[in-house]
């Protein structure tokens, strides 16, 4: 079974505190309650049905399956056509009240269709079989701190540690199922009226959609990606997770399987700009405030990622009882990269401070005081080697992108003084900005490749260098940058899409300390769309952008990577960074200027 599944076959549901993935056949194979980073109670995504899932589908084989989101919502409608007739399954998660719910409504369309619900609950990522009992008209599963209740008017019975319902639907029938998580030491939550919850959930998403102020080209594409970002938001704090999943492989059968259920500082400025560009100032402000709380403290202790509430201990471990998606091991939870030194995040944080004020969201004195402390630390440490944007697990290097983003940090500090009167040692910031730029131009350049290289003294190329004009480091038509773009397209393209870099088993190119092999990194190709736009190569940019849009699944969702050879989406899904890059590329295409609005120096 596991080998037949595709990441693209999944749909996303969310309630702004956690999310689930629903396979097109009707099986919820991934669910973490009560938060994105909690232990999964359905972990079949990374194993088999016995590791937890909830299948709700026709008992006879479906001849045809079609699905869609109700327009501008995350309410999933799946129509199954069988020999006996057709049914519609409506799946959604109501925006969070006291407890998280998954609501499923089976609606008869034609004929008499036998249906079957199979609920297999396995807490702690498929490891713990709960104790299941009947309480009044509710089935309750309990193990340790977790409890789930299932309510439905349909008769329920047990079969081999599975909670089963069998029933028949006819035209006009609507049969509800509601699964609710609650702490096991608390009493059973109040019942949820499925039809009322459906109406309220639709109203919530439509009201949110109506606040979207962007109505130019690619409007629907942009809004669909913003909808994903909204669903990946942890509403109590404003943090946005990189993805709702862990360990979906970057190569089928490979070891590049990471936990992305955390908040990366690197996503900060792009998220802020994407939300502000579409009119979602509340989300932008909440994300800015989350970031300031997360990085508060000693500048030396700033991490590249945090938990959804700002947690710093994201200890990485493997779950050896799970075989992984399509036998891709190991399955990891936690992320050891959280303690890496990645100098580029300081540039992202300072860019957030600048962009927030530039877009009319007032900053605070305490926030600016924190920025100055970060700048003071960076002044002493920007010359160090680091792990770089791709969080490599090999030796530290002087990554060109990292130095470029250190330049961004001091550039934005200077702009904060010049444009908004913020105080600080601006003369020193200017000196550092100039020193870093001169070093990058001298040490980051490869004469042999006629391109800016991945790291100092190397001839390896890296698609992150495409960000140079997007952050204002160089104009897009600078001769050296033009040459770099051509070199990147020549050496990193696979069927027209870009790898992050060439992974090698050994030698100078063995930068990441891992076995080689991964898909094309989709955000990099979206960056190329922007670069081509800024170079006036609009036909090429539009063609590539349309190609990238065609890689989305039928619901408009994208993962981290794509394998041009197999046609498979790869990596954690859906991926915030990819959808952010899509939004930025679409807006750059529409405006013919960098979204960050920073004009490069001549």
Image (cartoon, rainbow, N blue to C red):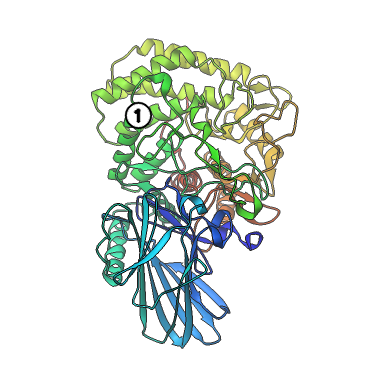
Pick out the residue farthest to the bottom.
111
Please say if 311 is above or below 174. Answer: above
In terms of depth relative to the viewer, which is nearer, 168 or 363?
A: 168
Which quadrant: the N terminus? bottom right
Q: Residue at x 58, y 79 (%)?
A: 63
User: Residue 296 is drawn in which quadrant?
Assistant: top left
Q: Position of residue 18 (x, y in %)?
A: 39, 51
In the structure shown, which secondary structural element does the residue marked by tag 1 occupy?
helix
User: Label 1: few (<14), some or many (≥20) within 10 Å?
Assistant: many
Please say if 440 is above or below 303. Answer: above
Is residue 574 among the parts visible in the rendering? no
User: Residue 427 is drawn in which quadrant?
Assistant: top left
Is residue 194 among the parts visible in the rendering? yes
Q: Residue at x 31, y 65 (%)?
A: 202
Q: For this view, does 113 lie left or right of residue 464?
A: left
Q: Residue at x 27, y 59 (%)?
A: 207
- Disc count in the image? 1
In terms of depth relative to the viewer, which is nearer, 443 or 175?
A: 175
Q: Position of residue 558 (x, y in %)?
A: 53, 53
Please say if 391 is above or below 84. Answer: above
Q: Residue at x 66, y 50 (%)?
A: 252
Q: Position of residue 514 (x, y in %)?
A: 67, 35
In terms of depth relative to the viewer, which is nearer, 137 or 112?
A: 137
In terms of depth relative to the viewer, which is nearer, 317 or 483?
A: 317
Q: For this view, does 537 lie left or right of residue 367?
A: right
Which residue position holds label 1? Answer: 354
Q: Position of residue 474 (x, y in %)?
A: 52, 27
């Amino acid at each position: 079974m596991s080998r037949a599944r595709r990441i693209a076959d999944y749909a996303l549901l969310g309630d702004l505190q956690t999310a689930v993935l629903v396979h097109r056949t009707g099986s919820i194979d991934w669910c973490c309650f009560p938060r994105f980073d909690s232990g999964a109670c359905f972990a079949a995504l990374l194993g088999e049905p016995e590791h937890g899932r909830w299948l709700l589908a026709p008992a006879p084989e479906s001849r045809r399956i079609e699905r869609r989101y109700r327009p501008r919502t995350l309410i999933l409608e799946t129509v199954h056509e069988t020999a006996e007739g057709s049914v519609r399954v409506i799946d959604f998660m109501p925006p969070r009240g006291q407890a998280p719910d998954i609501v499923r409504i089976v609606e008869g369309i034609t004929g008499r269709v036998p249906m079957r619900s199979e609920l297999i609950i396995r807490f702690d990522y498929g490891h713990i079989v709960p104790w299941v009992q009947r309480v009044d008209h509710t089935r309750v599963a309990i193990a340790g701190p977790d409890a789930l209740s299932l309510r439905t008017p349909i008769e329920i019975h047990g079969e081999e540690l599975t909670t089963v319902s069998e029933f028949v639907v006819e035209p006009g029938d609507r049969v509800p199922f509601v699964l609710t998580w609650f702490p096991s030491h608390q009493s059973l939550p109040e019942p949820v009226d499925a039809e009322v919850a459906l109406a309220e959930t639709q109203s919530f998403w439509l009201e949110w959609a109506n606040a979207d102020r962007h109505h130019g080209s690619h409007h629907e594409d942009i809004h669909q990606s913003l909808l994903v970002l909204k669903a990946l938001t942890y509403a109590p704090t404003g943090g946005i997770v990189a993805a709702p999943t862990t360990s979906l492989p970057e190569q089928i059968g490979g070891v590049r399987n990471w936990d992305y259920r955390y908040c990366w500082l690197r996503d900060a400025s792009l998220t802020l700009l994407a939300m502000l560009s579409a009119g979602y100032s509340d989300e932008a402000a909440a994300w800015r405030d989350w970031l300031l709380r997360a990085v508060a403290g000693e500048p030396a202790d700033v991490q590249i990622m945090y938990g959804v509430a700002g947690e710093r201990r994201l200890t990485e471990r493997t779950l050896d009882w799970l075989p992984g998606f399509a036998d891709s091991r190991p399955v990891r939870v936690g992320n050891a990269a959280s303690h890496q030194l990645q100098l580029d995040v300081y540039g992202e944080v300072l860019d957030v401070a600048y962009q927030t004020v530039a877009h009319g969201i007032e900053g605070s004195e305490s926030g600016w005081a924190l920025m100055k402390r970060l700048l003071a630390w960076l002044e002493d440490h920007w010359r160090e080697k680091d792990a770089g944007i791709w969080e490599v697990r090999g030796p530290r290097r002087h990554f060109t992108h990292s130095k470029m983003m250190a330049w961004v940090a001091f550039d934005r500090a200077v702009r904060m003084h010049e444009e908004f009167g913020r105080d600080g040692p601006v003369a020193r910031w200017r000196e550092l900005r100039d020193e870093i730029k001169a070093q990058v131009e001298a040490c980051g350049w490869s004469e042999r490749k006629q391109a800016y290289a991945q790291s100092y003294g190397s001839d390896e190329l890296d698609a992150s260098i495409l960000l140079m004009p997007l952050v204002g480091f160089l104009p897009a038509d600078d001769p050296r940058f033009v040459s770099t773009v051509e070199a990147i397209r020549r050496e990193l393209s696979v069927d027209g899409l870009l790898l992050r870099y060439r992974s090698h088993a050994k030698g100078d190119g063995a930068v990441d300390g891992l076995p080689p092999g991964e898909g094309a990194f989709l955000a990099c190709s979206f960056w190329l769309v922007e670069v081509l736009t800024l170079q006036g190569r609009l036909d090429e940019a539009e063609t590539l952008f349309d190609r990238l849009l065609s890689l989305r699944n039928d619901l408009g969702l994208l993962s981290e990577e794509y394998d041009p050879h197999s046609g498979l989406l790869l990596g954690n899904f859906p991926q915030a960074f990819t959808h952010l890059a899509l939004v930025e590329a679409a807006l750059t295409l529409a405006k013919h200027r960098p979204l960050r609005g920073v004009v490069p120096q001549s």
